[in-house]
Image (cartoon, rainbow, N blue to C red):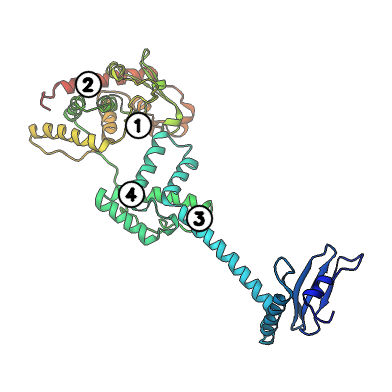
Amino acid sequence: MVKISEETTKRAICPAGRKDVLHFDDALPGFGLRVTAAGRRIFLYQYRNGAKVRRTTLGVWGSELTAAQARRKAETLRGQVRDRRDPVAERRARQAAAIAAEAEARAVAARAAYSVGVLIEQWTDQHLVGRSASYRAAVPRHLRTGLADWVNSPAAALSRADAVQVLDTVKAKNGPVAANRLRAEARACWTWAVRRGALSDNPWSATPRPLARETPRERVLTDAELGALYAAAARLTGPFGALIRILILTGQRRGEVAGMRWDELALDTGQWNLPGSRTKNHQAHTVPLPYPAVTLLRRVKRRQGSEVVFEGPRGTAVSGFGKIKGRLDTALASVAQRAGRSVEPWVLHDIRRSVATGMQRLGVRLEVTEAILNHVSGSRSGIVGIYQRHGWAAEKKAGLDAWAAHVLAAAKEVPHEA
C-alpha cells in the first residue's frame, strides 16, 4: 500500500485464513491500517520509544474517522514523538488520573453521606443490639443532643479540636459528669466505626477527660422529701404521675419503669416480670408489686393496641423527664421552706438510692434489698452469685410491702399545698 486514503482503505481486505492484516503508509511513517477478517478497518499509529515499540489506536474507519482525519491525528502524534514525548504513556496517565479522580469523588460522596447521624444510627442498630431497651434509647439520644450541631455533617470531618469544643460546651451547659458521659459514648461509637473501616481516625481518643475523677453520688432523699414527691406526683400530667410513684414504690431503674410493657405485668398476682433484654445486667427480674402499685397500674388508661404502659404522644415510652423534674423540684422546695432549709440538688436516680437506704432502715436484709434492685454486685457477686440461687421471692414481697406502707405514711404527713 503506497498511501492510506479513502479509496485504498475501502479496497483493503484481509487475506483468507488470517485474523487480520496490517498496512503502513509509505508517506507518513508509523501511520497504519489494520484490516480484520470481519471487515473492520482500524487506523493506528506506531512509533518507537527507546527500545520499545508503541502502538495506539486512532479510530475505526467509517463509524469514527475518515482516512484524512486519521492521517491528521497520526501527524499530530508524530510531532509529539519528535518532541521526545510518549503519547501512549501520556494517554495511560490521563486514564489513570481520571480513574483516580472518579474514585476520589466517590470517596468524598461516601464521606459526606456517612454523617454523624448515620454513624449513631448504625452503631445503635448493629452494635447496641444486645443492650437493654432503655440503654439503646438513652445513649443515642445523649449523642444526638451533645452533637446536635454535627448530626448532619460528615463523621470524618469532626476533628479532635472539634471534639474538645463539643465537650467544653456540654461541660459548661450540663456539668463535667455529663461531658464525661458524652466523651465515653462518642469514643465507643467512633471506635466501632474505625474497626469496621468506615472511618480512619477516632478524634475522641486523645481528648482530655472533662472531669478527671468522678465522685459517686450520695444524695439520699429524706422521708419528708419522698412523701412530698409521692404527693406531688398526683398532679403531674399524663402518665407521669403513676410513673414517678412506681419509681418511689419499687426502686427500679427509671428506664425500666418508663419502658414497662403490658405483657410484662401480671396484676392479678401482683407481679412485674422484666425479661433480660430490658434489664441493665441482662438478667430476668421479677418485681413483686405492692398493693398501691397494682392499684396505680390498674388506673392507667390503656389505648387499644398499645404495648407500653406509660405511653407518650407517639405511641412509644414516655420521655421529657426534665420538665417533669422541674415540677417535682417545686414540691421539694415547699417542704424545705417549711423546714427552714434550702433544697439540696437531686436527680431522679436518687430515688432508687433512697429506696435502698430506706428499706435498710426498715430492717430489710441486704441480700433482699439487692434482689429487689436486681443488683449482681455486693452480696450477690463472685462465688455467692454463682452458687446462691435462692430467689428471695417471699422476702422481696414483704420488703416492698413494708416500704410502700412507709411511703404512704410519709405522703400523708405532707400538707395539702405541697
Q: Which residue is mark 4?
A: 146
| Left or right: residue 416 compared with residue 97 | left
Q: Quadrant of the N terminus?
A: bottom right
Q: CA distance from mark 1 to mark 2?
A: 36 Å
Label 1: few (<14), some (14–19) or many (≥20) C-alpha neighbours in 10 Å: few
From this viewpoint, is residue 215 visible?
yes
| Left or right: residue 211 compared with residue 379 | left
Q: Which residue is mark 2?
A: 406
Q: CA distance from mark 4 to mark 1?
A: 23 Å
**Residue 377 appears in which quarter of the rendering?**
top left
Q: In the image, what residue type sits under mark 2?
A: His
Q: Earlier along the polypeptide chain: callout 2 or callout 3?
A: 3
Q: Residue furthest right?
A: 17
Q: Which residue is mark 1?
A: 314
Q: Earlier along the polypeptide chain: callout 4 or callout 1?
A: 4
Q: Which residue is mark 3?
A: 110
